[in-house]
Image (tube, rainbow, N blue to C red):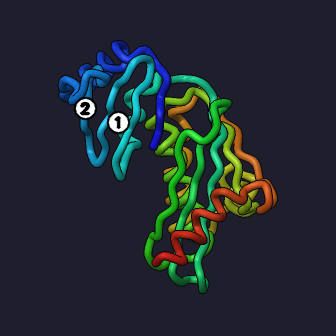
Amino acid sequence: MPVIECDVEAARERLEEAGVTVDSGNTDHERWRASRGGATAVAYDNKVVIQGSDPRDIEALLREGGGRAHVYFDGGSRGNPGPAAIGWVIVTGDGIVAEDGETIGTATNNQAEYEALIAALEAANDYEYDEVHIRGDSELIVKQVRGEYDTNNPELREKRVTVHELLQSFDEWTLEYVPREANDRADGLVNEALDQA
């Protein structure tokens, strides 16, 4: 359940500018409340609490855009191809901003890695970060995106193009390979999703 410390009147204005209906609070302590997608934002003095199954859209509207984030991604399949899942985490100086792990059907390990990177970049774009520092434990994907390796597989080539299109929305980005131990949160989200499938 995300909690955003902010000027709640400025946050209200951002929601209204985005076309979200903002209603009065239900109690004396609530300043206002608004719903979007699968989530409801409730404003108190100097903070907004978001409840619900899918807080990302409304949270992205409430957070002031800009700044820098570290993005971790991982994908994997059991069998190659086989049942596959992705995981990603966005971290700033305030800690974990957002994370997700979900199954994606049948895929190869490399397809899952690309899907995880795409999902992570879409989320970082939703939060309007200016600068992203991306880390993943697939040396192949990192080197393909950076142009150090060719991509012979047509489907992976298409996913690489999508990644480059998403990267254009940031003022600055870096992408580096890290060992699996340094990517344990994203890796754990992949395995949790596969275990629950």
Distance between mark 1 and mark 2 Cα atoms: 9 Å
Q: Position of residue 97 (x, y in %)?
A: 55, 39
Which amino acid type is shown beneath numbered disc 1? Ile
Give percent across and percent down for residue 40: 29, 39
Residue on which the image places disc 1: 58
> x, y percentage for residue 5?
49, 23
Circles 1 and 2, Cβ within 8 Å, touching? The answer is: yes
- Tag 2 secondary structure: strand
Q: Residue at x 23, y 26 (%)?
A: 25
In this rendering, would 84 be left or right of 35?
right
Q: Residues within 10 Å of mark 1 (few under 14, many from 20)?
A: many
Element type at marker 1?
helix
Q: In the rendered image of this protein, does residue 195 appear above or below residue 30? A: below
Residue 40 visible at all: yes
Q: Nearer the viewer, residue 162 or 25?
A: 25
Of tags 1 and 2, which is closer to the observer? 2
Q: Residue at x 40, y 28 (%)?
A: 48
Residue sitting at the far front: 28
Q: Position of residue 115 (x, y in %)?
A: 52, 61
What residue does disc 2 label? 34
